[in-house]
Amino acid sequence: MGFKCGIVGLPNVGKSTIFNALSGASVPAENYPFCTVDPNVGVVEVPDERLFKIKEIVGSPKAVPTYIEFVDIAGLVKGASKGEGLGNQFLSHIRAMDAIAHVVRCFRDPNVSHVDPELDPEKDIKVINLELILADLEVAERNISKLEKIVRSGDKKREKELLALRKAREALLGEIPLRFVDFSEEEKGLLKAYQFITLKPVLYIANVDEEGISGNELTEVVKRIAESEQAEFVIICGKLEAELSQLSEEERNEFLEAMGMKESALNRLIKAGYRILNLITFFTANENEARAWTVKRGTKVIEAAGKIHSDMQKGFIKAEVINCDDLFKFSSLTEAKEAGVVRIEGRDYEVKDGDLIYIKFKA
């Protein structure tokens, strides 16, 4: 699996409530700052109707979905980059994430405390972003000093890395998150080891009360910021979704139908997390099971074979591929093969989202 999306935000914006809804786990969500001390990990099924259609067409007895990990990280506060509010501990947790889900409070409730008397989503977002920028700046400056000494000693191989770090520092000094900097692929590779937080993709979650499910003036602020950053944006009522997650699937579907909703906000959130990680799904199906697999966009089929089993990658011969969009036009896989829509692909084929793949390999 290995793909992790960290849930961050100010204290008491609803991070743990949303995490509870995502994972069905019972983690503390009390009304006081720093309630969450250790990061909680929720392994969440990625909803995908295509998997169950493939199961029916191929005749597999069961369906095995793919997953994504969400990690609930304690609330950050102003000064976190300098250790305020247990900041250093939790910033280190964020560095280990592949992406960030930033929860922003978009509901008013006098019974739920807020770090600032004034509820201002734009200000709240700026507080978090600035702390992450300052944390990255500290990493950049510390390592620039080290690299300068190494380069001066005659190690010219590290010069490009030093230049990339200086470029990062310049942006951070201008309070620009690194994901907005035009780094080359080589520069991104050189910076990868530093785990810069602001280089990670971001998903904004506007947490509302039940009256704000369709949006309100506060969610519009978050939406505008997300659009300006070309980031994902989801409105979710964490409290309602947490309650829905405790219902049976039948009861949940009945509620959604009564509300005129095609899917829960939770499903939209999971899918958005999947997108910001730049992930795609491919499928396998046989007499035992139909299974969904997660890979990065751009993955070669020989690498996807290794995801299934290392022997398949080592002994790879070819792959039989049909995208589910083509498969769904037929009533069976045999019918699709007879129609000639199943392709033979070599080791350099780039897997597409929705591909059903059969690996031929030498054991």
Image (cartoon, helix red, strand yellow):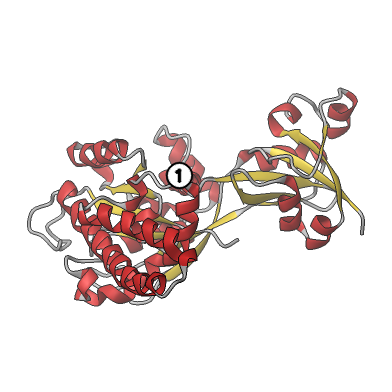
Tell which of 250 and 108 is nearer to you: 108
Percent position of residue 196, x then y: 38, 61
State the quadrant of the C terminus.
bottom right
Label 1 crowd (10 A; few <14 / some 14-19 / many >=20):
many
* Residue at the front extreme of this rendering: 154
Q: Quadrant of residue 231?
A: top left
Q: Which residue is mark 1?
A: 272
In this image, 177 relative to 22: left or right? Answer: left
State the quadrant of the N terminus.
bottom right
Q: Residue at coordinates 50% horizontally, 51% vertically from top-left? A: 186
Q: Amino acid at mark 1?
A: Ala
Q: Is residue 108 above or below residue 225?
A: below
Helix, strand, or loop for circle 1?
Answer: helix
Q: Residue at coordinates 40% horizontally, 72% vertically from top-left? A: 39
Percent position of residue 170, x then y: 26, 54
Q: Quadrant of residue 224?
A: top left
Q: Residue at coordinates 69% horizontally, 40% vertically from top-left? A: 350
